[in-house]
Image: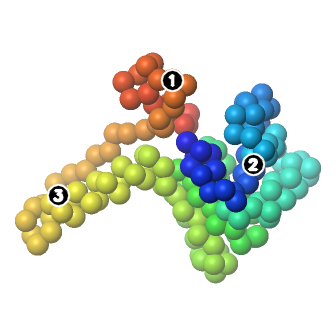
Amino acid sequence: PTIEFLLRMPTVVLNVVSMDGRELADVVERYGPRVKGHVLDVTCVDAEAQSAQDVLVKEADLVVSLIPATLHTSIARLAIKHRRHMITASYVSDDMQALDAEAQAAGVVLLNEAGLDPGIDHMSALQVIHRATANGRGRLISFSSLCGGLPAPEVAGSNPLSYKFSWSP
């Protein structure tokens, strides 16, 4: 869904990175010439891989990181270095929080929790909570969020919401 959404803007060209070359080739074939595929293991610490990451972030206008939360920090450091805003769908980890002052000083937004869960569910819940508690009409006793996954056409019918988990629990 993220690729489809971004490609609605006719001038957008996407660099999509994956360590799975076959999956990446399918994505590039599906979405066409405005999607450039890069096979890269972001866990690799050798100089060539680090240089490739650096170049990709430097050449980007915006970094959308959908990798596991534990891997965001190294990409965020590059985003700060090259003054590129970065969006993740993950909760704010202590390591990401530790980059806040540096990011602000560089004028870089590191926007976390911008997915379904966390993200949309929390914004929707907050809207309902604000309405309920406005002018002292209601009182919040507790809040729990049970949510997770992304709509995925390829799994339609396999579960009631046609959702596919986007992370490893």
Q: Is residue 46 left or right of residue 140?
A: right
Residue 155 disc label: 1
> Which amino acid, mark 1?
Val
The answer for how far apart the CA atoms under marks 2 and 3 are is 47 Å
Q: Does any portion of residue 77 appear in the rendered image?
A: no
> Which amino acid, mark 2?
Arg
**Which image quadrant for residue 100?**
bottom right
**Which image quadrant for residue 133?**
bottom left
| In contact (CB < 8 Å): disc 2 and disc 3 | no
> Which amino acid, mark 3?
Leu
Q: Is residue 29 left or right of residue 163?
A: right
Counting labels gives: 3
Mark closer to the chain start, 2 or 3: 2
The answer for how far apart the CA atoms under marks 1 and 3 are is 37 Å
x and y percentages locating residue 58 in the rendered image: 80, 64
Say which of marks 1 and 3 sits in front: 1
* Residue extending farthest left: 137
Q: Is residue 94 above or below residue 31?
A: below
- Secondary element under disc 2, as helix, strand or loop, is loop
Q: Is residue 166 left or right of residue 161?
A: right
Q: Residue beneath label 2, please?
A: 34
x and y percentages locating residue 110 in the rendered image: 58, 65
Q: Residue beneath label 3, please?
A: 140
The answer for how far apart the CA atoms under marks 2 and 1 are is 26 Å
